[in-house]
Image (tube, rainbow, N blue to C red):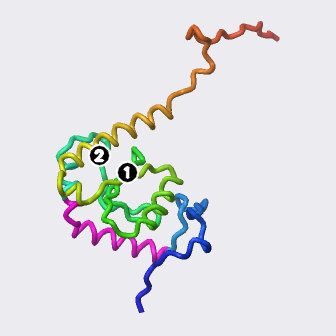
Amino acid sequence: MKKTLSLRPASERADVPNIQKKGRGWVISGSRLDAIHDMAREMRREPDEAHAALAEELAKEDLGKYKFKRYAVIGSAIVDFACQPLKLVVALDRGDAPEIERRRDASLAAVGLKVVRYDAAEVLGDPEGAGRAVLAAMKARYEELRAAARPQRSTYSRSGARPQRSHSPRSRG
């Protein structure tokens, strides 16, 4: 008998799955993780039309060190595209199970990943536009992470000069 996953009623579950302090924040059995990786591998071999169109557009661009992995496994989720250095996930909406997608996005956001969603029909209609939108999201995420990593200037005075060291006499002895 094949098991299927379903959502529990709202009264029986938390809004967002709890993150555990184990294995990048996810607790997954080895056999389940192997099954998820096998499923992702199969999806990479046979992508749907929207995914293939966006992958082709992203392959045309010179992204430097920022590459996207197709059908990446993050925790127990398989995401359409993932850029690890930018902590950015690109997801294509296919119109199935919005509640599951919302919970998965919340789980990914809880571990510091930003999820950007695009409609699969729009990607098929205008793959170049979708590629430009992904590039714009990448640039915005790069600036966001860069701004967060900047050192605080609270140790400097208003004039911008460095604080002076106090020169205390050394004891010689």
Residue located at (55% from left, 59% from top): 25
Q: Is residue 37 magenta?
A: yes
- Name above or below for residue 13 compared with residue 122: below
Q: Residue furthest bottom?
A: 1
Which callout, 1 or 2, points at the residue further toward the start of the chain? 1
Q: Where in the figure is residue 33, as x and y percent of width and height?
A: 44, 71
Q: Which is more toward the observer, 86 or 24?
A: 86
Q: How many marks overall?
A: 2
Task: Work out how far the residue at label 1 is from the one at label 2, CA to CA, in angstroms.
Answer: 8 Å
> Disc 1 marks which amino acid?
Val
Mark 1 and mark 2 residues within 8 Å of each other at the beta carbon: yes
Name the residue carrying label 1.
116
> Disc 2 marks which amino acid?
Val
Which type of secondary structure does the marked residue at label 1 adopt? strand
Q: Quadrant of residue 1?
A: bottom left
Q: Which is more toward the observer, 104 or 157?
A: 104
- What range of the chain is rendered magenta? 30-52
Residue located at (59% from left, 63% from top): 18
Q: Which is more toward the observer, 80 or 12?
A: 12
Q: Is 75 left, or right, of 95 in this rendering?
A: right
Name the residue carrying label 2.
134
Q: Which is more toward the observer, 166 or 49?
A: 49
Structural crowding at the residue carrying mark 2, measured as other residues with C-alpha within 10 Å and reported as few (<14), some (14–19) or many (≥20)? many
The C terminus lies in quadrant: top right
Which type of secondary structure does the marked residue at label 2 adopt? helix
